[in-house]
C-alpha cells in the first residue's frame, strides 16, 4: 500500500490533477472517490473525463447510478450514494473487469464489491476552494501510477 497527498487551491487544479492521472490509466482500472457532500468527487471525475478525451458534458449520475462516456477509453462513472445499506449488486463485476475506466463516487457504500486492486481517492475540505486529495494505491499497478503522478 502506498499513499500520496496533494493540496490543491482551486477547482481547476483538481481537474488538472485528475487529467494527469487519466493519462496513466489502463482498461479495467478502478478509481474510488470518497469525501463528504460537495467535496469535489464529481469535479475530479470531470477532470478524468477531460484527460480521457471525453467530449460530452459529465454530470452527476446520482439518479442513474451509472453513466457511460466515450473517450480514448470508455469512462464508467458511478455514484452509489443511493446504495448505502442496500447490499445490492447491480452487476459491478462487469464494469470492474470491463474495457473502460471505472470511477465510483461514495465507494465506501459498496466496499464488499470493490476489487482488491484499485486506487482510492479521498477528498477533504481545506478551505472554500482548497482541498486535500489523498491517494491510496492497492496493488503494484497503482503504486507505479502514484510514483509517476
Ligand atoms: N479545489 C476544488 N476542488 C473541487 N471542487 C471545488 C474546489 N473548490 C471549490 N469547489 C467547489 O466544490 C463543489 C464540488 O462539487 P462536486 O459536485 O464536485 O462534489 P461531490 O463530492 O461530487 O458532491 P456529491 O457528494 O454531492 O456528489 C463545486 O461547487 C466546486 O465548484
Ligand atoms: Mg458528486
Image: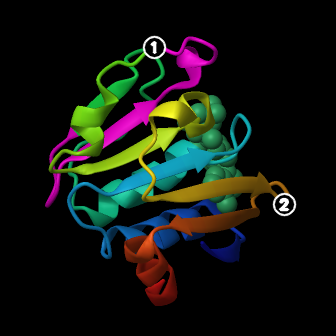
Q: Is residue 145 above or below residue 115?
A: below
Picture residue at 46% right of the left edge, 65% below the top: 18
Disc number at residue 88?
1
Residue that badge 2 annotates: 126
Question: Residue 36, position in %: x, y?
Answer: 74, 38
Taking the image in four quarters, ligand 1 sits in the one at top right
Q: Callout 1 environment at 10 Å: few (<14), some (14 to 19), or many (20+)?
A: few
Based on the picture, tell me whether residue 133 belongs to the magenta stretch. no
Classify residue 20 as left or right of residue 13: left
Along the viewing direction, whichever of 41 and 147 lies nearer the viewer? 147
Mark 1–mark 2 distance (CA, rounded to whole Å): 34 Å
Classify residue 75 as left or right of residue 14: left
Identify the element where label 2 is drawn: loop
Q: Earlier in the sequence, mark 1 or mark 2?
A: 1
Q: Is residue 70 above or below residue 112?
A: below
Q: Is residue 120 above or below residue 70?
A: below
Question: Residue 46, position in %: x, y?
Answer: 42, 51
The answer to whether one can see residue 112 in this image is: yes
Region in magenta? 69-87
Q: Residue furthest bottom?
A: 148
Classify residue 95 as left or right of residue 123: left
Picture residue at 40% right of the left edge, 22% below the top: 65
Amino acid at each position: 500500500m502506498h499513499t500520496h497527498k496533494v493540496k490543491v487551491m482551486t477547482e481547476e487544479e483538481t481537474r488538472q490533477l485528475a487529467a494527469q492521472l487519466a493519462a496513466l490509466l489502463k482498461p479495467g482500472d478502478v478509481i474510488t472517490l470518497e469525501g463528504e457532500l460537495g467535496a469535489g468527487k464529481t469535479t475530479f471525475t470531470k477532470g478524468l473525463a477531460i484527460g480521457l478525451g471525453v467530449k460530452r458534458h459529465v454530470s452527476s449520475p446520482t439518479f442513474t447510478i451509472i453513466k457511460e462516456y466515450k473517450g480514448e477509453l470508455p469512462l464508467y462513472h458511478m455514484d452509489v450514494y443511493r446504495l448505502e445499506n442496500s447490499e445490492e449488486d447491480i452487476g459491478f463485476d462487469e464494469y470492474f473487469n470491463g474495457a473502460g475506466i471505472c470511477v465510483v463516487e461514495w465507494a465506501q457504500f459498496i466496499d464488499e464489491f470493490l476489487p482488491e486492486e484499485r486506487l482510492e481517492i479521498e477528498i477533504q475540505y481545506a478551505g472554500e476552494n482548497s482541498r486535500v486529495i489523498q491517494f491510496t494505491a492497492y496493488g503494484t499497478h497503482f503504486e507505479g501510477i502514484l510514483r509517476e503522478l
